[in-house]
Amino acid sequence: MEVCGILRRLKWRFYPGLWSLEGLVLLLFLSHLGRCQIRYSIPEEMKKGSFVGNVAQDLGLDLTRLRSGRARIVTEQATQYTELKTDKGSLVVNERIDREQLCADITPCSFSIEIILENPIELHRVTVEVLDVNDHAPVFKSNHIKMEISESAVIGSRFVLESADDPDVGLNGLQRYVLSSTDHFVLKQHANPDGTKFAEMILQKPLDREGQPRLSLKLVAMDGGTPQRSGTVNIDISVLDVNDNAPIFNQTVYRATVSENAQIGTYITTVNATDADSGSNGLVAYSFSNLKENLAGIFNIDQSTGNITVAGQIDFEKDKKYEIRVEARDKGGLTDLVKIIIDIIDINDNAPIINVMSFSSPMPENAPLGSTIAVINVKDADSQKNGEITCSIDKEFPFKIKSSLTNYYTLISDMAFDREHFPEYNITVTATDSGSPPLSSFIHLHLKLSDVNDNAPVFDEPTFYAHVLENNPPGISIFKVSARDTDSNQNARISYLLEENQVSGSPVSTYVSINSETGVLHAVRSFDYEQVKHFELVVKAQDGGSPPLSSNVTVKIMIQDQNDNPPQVLYPVQTGGPLVAEMVPRSADVGYLVTKVVAVDVDSGQNAWLSYKLQKATDRALFEVGLQNGEIRTTRQVTDKDAVKQRLTVVVEDNGQPSRSATVNVNVAVADSFPEVLSEFTDFTHDKEYNDNLTFYLVLALAVVSFLFITCLVVIISVKIYRWRQSRILYHPSLPVIPYYPPRYSDTLGSGTLQHVYNYEVCRTTDSRKSDCKFGRAASQNVLMMDPSSTGTMQRIQSEKNILDEPDSPLEVSWQYCV
């Protein structure tokens, strides 16, 4: 009968009436039907591949669900008798089924299987009943039965015959016995409580040993199958003389109990029968009657005392009680039968057996709460409390276990997973029975969590600082950024990228590049501290997940200065023009400030710390230079013996490693007035270090001037010749001759054609820290700027002073004081 199909059909059939109270109750029951049990009946000995039933139809499942759920069969038998065809949804025979081997004499004979589907997990139980086929004939243990019966046996005496064994059941089993025709005996059949049948002969006519000492009979055992099968045994009876009392048991039924796993030799009970005869005819021997083969080695009976003891292994899980018959036989062959019922007491000798039906590992770490981890089956062969099972797991783990079907337990998640904290779990499932003492068993489930990209890369610091020396070679490694991602595999594979931003108006990629795999920053160009002292860039770390996660970090690149620039002298200015001289009056005191050398260094730090040293001087004892400030001061009183021309060479040196320096020449004039200085400075020449280039330029200028002079001379001669020829052609003697005078020709203040214009430029420095220009007519100053090639004298300037007072004088004098 197909249970689920009937219920579903009932559900739809009663749908129109679901608004009634009975309909609502039935609908509520059917809507909660999540797991079904179906039952099939098949005959034994079916061929492999024979159809059993349409599981998909009966369970209400479509074929797509069977395939997607990876439907499979789980059975308790060692042999898998059935197979599930997922492509058709049918259940077929997988192995030959022998009902007698599977169930022996148990009826009805059936076995159960579980069909498991995953995603989501479903359990369905299928019970297959195996119907008996008459494939066995009744069989006696032996071909001959030898009996001895006293001739004095009274009418009505009973003689139990050997039973035939037929493994089939029901109508196919043993049904009746038939005894060959005889005048002395009639056959009577009996049935044991376990369903087995046996026969006994009842004497209906006295025996006469003298007339017939031996009797030969045939006993036929027949079953009720189609076709009918039978078995035969020959009975040989020897007639004995004079034994007219049979043994009689003192109880009609004996009851006893024994614990399973009782040791061999354990006493069970004692049977007792008495015989009224005396002598050898009164001696009684005890034996088991028609004992089944499976009981032959379990119990033993003492034929003299009737004591029944344990002879083999007793297992409650196989048989909960035994019914055996004991025969008491005297020497005359007279017998009596008695039934003994032995109840087996169960002891807790079986630990629970755990089988994992389904186990999902690895499990994604973002699995929802209540996800099924595993389905396990737990069974205990013991009974009552000894078979009551409790399943448990470690409480510290985020799981719980609950019961689903009978003997089935589901392990589910009890909280959210986090692979980064607990990547795996070793779960111990313990099954304990309720026996005394309790027995338990356990299994270990190693659950792994698969990674989900739920963690972005994390840098060790919020901001990184990198230092690099300027003038670095392009391509040098500057710094390495490192991020870590607690995810795994591809989700933890980090790539490094530069975020686009500007550094001094240029893309950051023109300054640095980054290795996407290692995070190493490389310089793209050579840095110059004097142009860029520091800059910032943003590095993005991105993992390989889908979708990818990323984080940013700021890297500050600090350019470190190198001593790559020499000091630059700002004052005094070193040019190839007119010489500059500082005047020191002869009345100057000790420590008189002559001038100050001003220099700068575009480097920074100690590379820009400047020191001033006097390298050489005309008189080293007269001047000194301040080490830190570059001030040139007198070290003693100026005397008349000191030369007017004093030349100092000052070295400006920075504090770098190695240090760089610059040299400046300072001209000092020791005099109280300009005329005194002028006569001395006419021969004041520059050092050779300034004339090296000057010679080249003079030679070049001379060559150019010579070329221009020759060119002009050729042109003038050509023009003169051309004019002369024209004048000869157009010559008229009557024309007047007009003399030619060049422009601004004058003979004022004397004879000559030169213009009376003199221009004197005088520069004065009042403070070396300032620069300014003033115009005035004063003639006494501290600083002189003059051309050594000039031929004018200070005396002439004084003689022409009166001329300058005249407003219309052609002599123009300009004084310029530079401060």
Image (cartoon, rainbow, N blue to C red):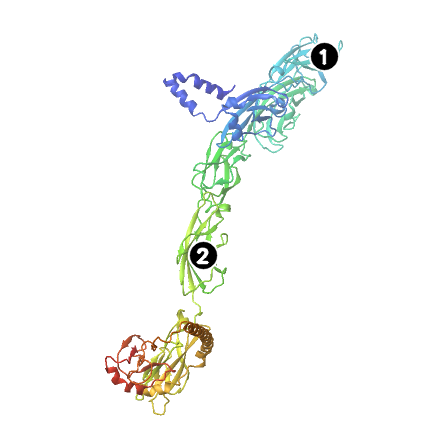
Mark 1 lies on a secondary structure that is strand
The Cα atoms of the two marked residues, 1 and 2, are separated by 120 Å
Q: Is residue 657 above or below residue 203?
A: below
Quadrant position of the C terminus in the picture = bottom left
The one nearer the camera, 734 or 154, is 734
Residue 286 visible? The answer is yes
The one nearer the camera, 155 or 397, is 397
Determine whether, in the image, residue 142 is placed left or right of residue 522. right
> Callout 2, which amino acid?
Thr
Determine whether, in the image, residue 813 is placed left or right of residue 410. left
x and y percent of residue 136 in the render? Answer: 66, 18
Q: Is residue 805 above or below residue 204?
A: below
The one nearer the camera, 656 or 418, is 656
Q: Is residue 657 above or below residue 295?
A: below
x and y percent of residue 695 in the render? Answer: 46, 78
x and y percent of residue 32 in the render? Answer: 43, 25
The one nearer the camera, 1 or 513, is 513
Q: Earlier in the sequence, mark 1 or mark 2?
A: 1
The residue carrying mark 1 is 217
Mark 2 lies on a secondary structure that is helix
Q: Quadrant of residue 809?
A: bottom left
Query: In the displayed image of the protein, which residue is found farthest to the bottom?
Result: 641
What residue sits 43% from the left and 70% below the top?
A: 565
Between marks 1 and 2 in the image, the one whose residue lies nearer the viewer: 2
Residue 462 visible? The answer is no
The residue carrying mark 2 is 510
x and y percent of residue 510 in the render? Answer: 45, 56
Density class for disc 2 (Cα within 10 Å; few <14, some 14-19, many ≥20) is: few
Q: Quadrant of residue 583?
A: bottom left
